[in-house]
């Protein structure tokens, strides 16, 4: 029915008027309900101590956390994949591969435990060294001497150092100082203030005579690769008195989030 029909048909107009009133009343009721809902929602948020700006900030923080978690999970999966793949190469027998993989994954897990305690922000170098060597030490007759200044390291450096120490510990129990009853290991580090570089040394003593390996194992390649990741210089020395590992790196590569 057109507006012209309404003008020529008073009865139709009068019958439509009540319907328009009902629609108008429903619109008013709906607006009141929406307004009341908004008031109720705001009251609940206020009671909970949350306002719109805080909700927005919380949403943004949650997004950042999820993105960071996704990034770390991807990196961990890539690290595990590399460990499994490289550990299986050039190994004879399933048992050898199983022990190699298990040891490296346990080291990775211990490093993550340290980071979890520090909320994935950083961890002290001394704590990392003690955590990495604990499983290979003897509390009744300590095999390790550990000394150095406190240095807070980022998550990437923590994992690299922990994995390196695990390789060194594993090797020394098989071929180095810890394969002998009187074997001992000194781990020390210093910070060169003028150059802002870290110098870390692993020195084995009272062990069997050592010789350079005939071929570079995955463990050796891993140690060198982890050192390069931190922009450091790695040296493996097979001295007559025992094996020596030295690591020299800029402090910024250990403490900077861009490392």
Image: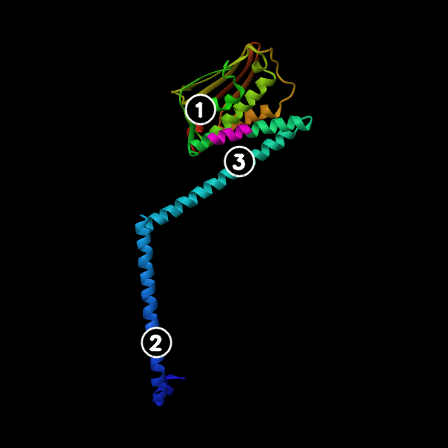
Furthest residue in direction front, as rendered? 140
Q: Quadrant of the N terminus?
A: bottom left
- In the picture of the structure, the residue carrying the numbered disc 3 is 76
**Could you tell me residue 253's position as x and y percent?**
45, 28
Relative vertical location of residue 240 with respect to residue 52 in this rendering, above or below: above
For residue 9, side relative to residue 211 (left or right): left
Please tell me the numbered disc located at residue 127.
1
Report crowding for label 1: few under 14, some 14 to 19, many 20 or more residues within 10 A (C-alpha): some
**Could you tell me residue 122's position as x and y percent?**
42, 30
Residue shown at the point (49%, 41%) measured from the top left: 70
Mark closer to the chain start, 2 or 1: 2
- Under circle 1, the secondary element is helix
Please tell me the numbered disc located at residue 22.
2
Mark closer to the chain start, 2 or 3: 2
For the magenta stretch, what is the residue range?
106-113
For residue 241, side relative to residue 145 (left or right): right
Q: Kindly check if marks 2 and 3 are in contact, taking CB atoms under 8 A apart as contact.
A: no
Q: Kindly check if marks 2 and 1 are in contact, taking CB atoms under 8 A apart as contact.
A: no
Which picture quadrant has residue 206?
A: top right
Report crowding for label 2: few under 14, some 14 to 19, many 20 or more residues within 10 A (C-alpha): few
């Amino acid at each position: 029915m057109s507006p012209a029909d309404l003008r020529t048909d008073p009865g139709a107009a009068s019958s439509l008027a009540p319907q328009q009133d009902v629609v108008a009343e429903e619109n008013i009721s709906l607006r009141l309900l929406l307004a009341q809902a908004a008031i109720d929602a705001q009251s609940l948020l206020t009671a909970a101590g949350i306002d719109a700006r805080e909700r927005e900030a919380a949403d943004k923080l949650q997004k950042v956390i999820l993105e960071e978690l996704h990034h770390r999970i991807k990196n961990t999966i890539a690290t595990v994949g590399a460990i499994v793949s490289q550990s299986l190469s050039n190994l004879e027998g399933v048992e050898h591969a199983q022990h190699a993989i298990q040891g490296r994954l346990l080291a990775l897990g211990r490093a993550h435990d340290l980071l979890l305690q520090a909320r994935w922000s950083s961890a002290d170098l001394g704590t990392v060294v003690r955590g990495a060597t604990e499983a290979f030490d003897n509390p009744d007759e300590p095999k390790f001497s550990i000394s150095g200044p406190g240095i807070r390291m980022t998550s990437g450096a923590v994992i690299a150092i922990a994995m390196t120490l695990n390789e060194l510990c594993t090797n020394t129990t098989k071929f180095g100082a810890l394969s002998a009853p009187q074997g001992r290991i000194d781990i020390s580090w210093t910070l060169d203030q003028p150059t802002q570089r870290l110098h870390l040394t692993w020195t084995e003593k009272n062990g069997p005579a050592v010789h350079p390996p005939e071929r570079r194992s995955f463990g050796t390649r891993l140690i060198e690769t982890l050192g390069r990741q931190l922009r450091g210089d790695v040296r493996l020395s097979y001295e007559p008195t025992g094996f020596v590992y030295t690591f020299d790196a800029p402090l910024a590569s250990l403490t900077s989030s861009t490392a």
